[in-house]
């Protein structure tokens, strides 16, 4: 007989004020609901008010995103003293916004781990303070910074990390530097990791293989690839303050894969 | 015949200005020399000048130390949704200094991961700013804060994390709160992890099983237990500025075990 096994228990330990947009689940079956961009923004701003400054968040996001990237690059098999002459190359494509700053932080931690890092950031006269402080630290690593697509490698690199999009300024996509960077990424054939990609009405300019969502996922389009969730250190009571009932889905990890049930 | 195998190649990728104090090596044989407390302090102060603020360092140290603690607690075997009624209990013993602030940050990240955290911090009228901002964030987790040893558990906990010692104020050891905390730890029989223990002329008041050194190790006494090294995000050129030739010994990890060769 075709006896169906009991379905795995679904654990609803996170409840959001406006459920029903899109839900994910963890490897162990915990349900992780998505939140709207507005609620996500409110969560971060309440966290900042309690002292989880942008600077702290950039540091933690950079550490955890680089840990994920190091795993994607092959982890201990790739980064051993024996492989010192075959260091992996990672290109970070960053826009002039907080998402870009997150990418620079990730790039710094990768460069600190002897990854060959090339950071693309377009030239602007006035930069966000978060960008300039990240750049100042990045400049002390062995990483390279370029502002023109012409200075990016022609041959395939090991990994491209895309931080081109901001959540608010969709018009950036029309700018020449954005289109050039997106074209370069699509031509390079390296797998792409998107950090903190926005909710997108239309197709992503760069199709990614993996996406890293921060804290709680937004309802992401399929074109961002496999979704991972990154712990960004928001304490439970901050979730409560914005109306989210929350228990950590992370277990002992700081980055976990999410699935569409 | 008793043919000796060729010894593993020792890779000297880190060179310090005053070698010879004490050396460690990694699992893959890389030599990690220790540095004096004065040089370590200069390293951190130059890093701060370039933008690696104390706040950033506290965040990164907290994340990486909590990752180590989660592994010591049993990792994925212990922290699954099935074990939600058997949450591990960790007591953090913190003094009123930067080392204590590092402990509070670690405790916050542990509490964020559903560990039962009890933070001991003695009462002082005026606290270091780094302590008050860490406490403010910690208070938003489900963690508990106590200022009296009487409020710590009588029965053995799963892990004690000691951040009682500062590098500069050895006289703290004579204070009643310190002696009470050390006595409690020694009586509890839980294994102890020391974060950032000082170079000690005499026996440690709390004998630890593991010690986590930050960035580069100090020449630590045997009584701190097995030494681990934590990446705190200092870029290569900052090492150079204080006279240290540096290549990361971390590979793809952020916390690695060190051995006395």
Image (cartoon, coloured by chain):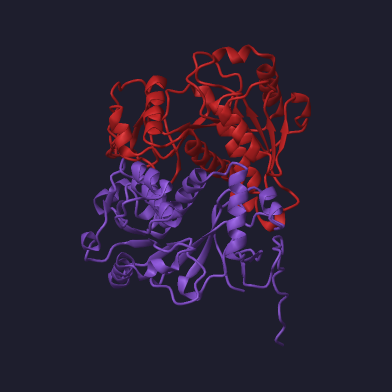
Chain colours: A purple, B red
Of B194 and A242, the residue lying toward us: A242
Q: Hey, which residue is sitting farthest bottom in the picture?
A: A1
B197 to the left or right of A94 = right
A260 to the left or right of A206 = right
Of A94 and A33, the residue lying toward us: A94
User: Is residue A259 at least partly visible in the picture?
Assistant: yes
Tell me where residue A99 appears, x and y as whole percent. Answer: 44, 57
Q: Quadrant of the C terminus of chain A?
A: bottom right
Of A193 and A34, the residue lying toward us: A34
Residue drawn 42% across and 56% down? A97
Residue drawn 51% across and 43% down? A56
Query: Against A190, is B232 above or below?
Result: above
Q: Quadrant of the N terminus of chain A?
A: bottom right
Query: Against B138, is A122 above or below?
Result: below
Of A213 and B197, the residue lying toward us: A213
Tell me where residue A51 appears, x and y as whole percent. Answer: 59, 41
Residue drawn 60% across and 19% down? B205
């Amino acid at each position: 007989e075709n006896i169906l096994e009991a379905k795995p228990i679904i654990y609803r330990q996170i409840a959001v004020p406006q459920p029903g947009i899109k839900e994910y689940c963890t490897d162990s079956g915990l349900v992780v609901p998505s939140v709207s961009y507005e609620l996500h923004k409110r969560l971060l701003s309440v966290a900042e008010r309690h002292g989880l400054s942008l600077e702290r968040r950039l540091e933690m996001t950079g550490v955890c995103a680089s840990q994920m990237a190091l795993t994607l690059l092959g982890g201990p098999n790739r980064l051993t003293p024996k492989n010192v002459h075959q260091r992996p190359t990672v290109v970070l494509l960053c826009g002039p916004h907080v998402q870009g700053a997150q990418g620079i932080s990730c790039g710094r931690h990768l460069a600190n781990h002897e990854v060959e890092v090339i950071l693309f950031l377009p030239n602007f006269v006035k930069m966000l303070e978060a960008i300039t402080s990240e750049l100042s630290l990045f400049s002390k690593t062995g990483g390279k910074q370029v502002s023109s697509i012409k200075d990016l490698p022609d041959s395939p690199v090991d990994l491209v990390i895309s931080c081109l999009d901001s959540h608010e300024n969709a018009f950036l996509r029309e700018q020449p530097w954005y289109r050039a960077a997106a074209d370069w990424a699509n031509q390079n054939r390296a797998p792409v990791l998107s950090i903190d990609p926005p909710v997108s009405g239309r197709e992503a300019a760069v199709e990614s293989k993996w996406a890293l969502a921060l804290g709680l996922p937004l309802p992401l389009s399929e074109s961002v690839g496999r979704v991972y969730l990154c712990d960004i250190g928001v304490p439970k009571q901050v979730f409560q303050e914005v109306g989210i009932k929350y228990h950590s889905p992370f277990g002992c990890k700081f980055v976990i894969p999410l699935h569409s049930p």
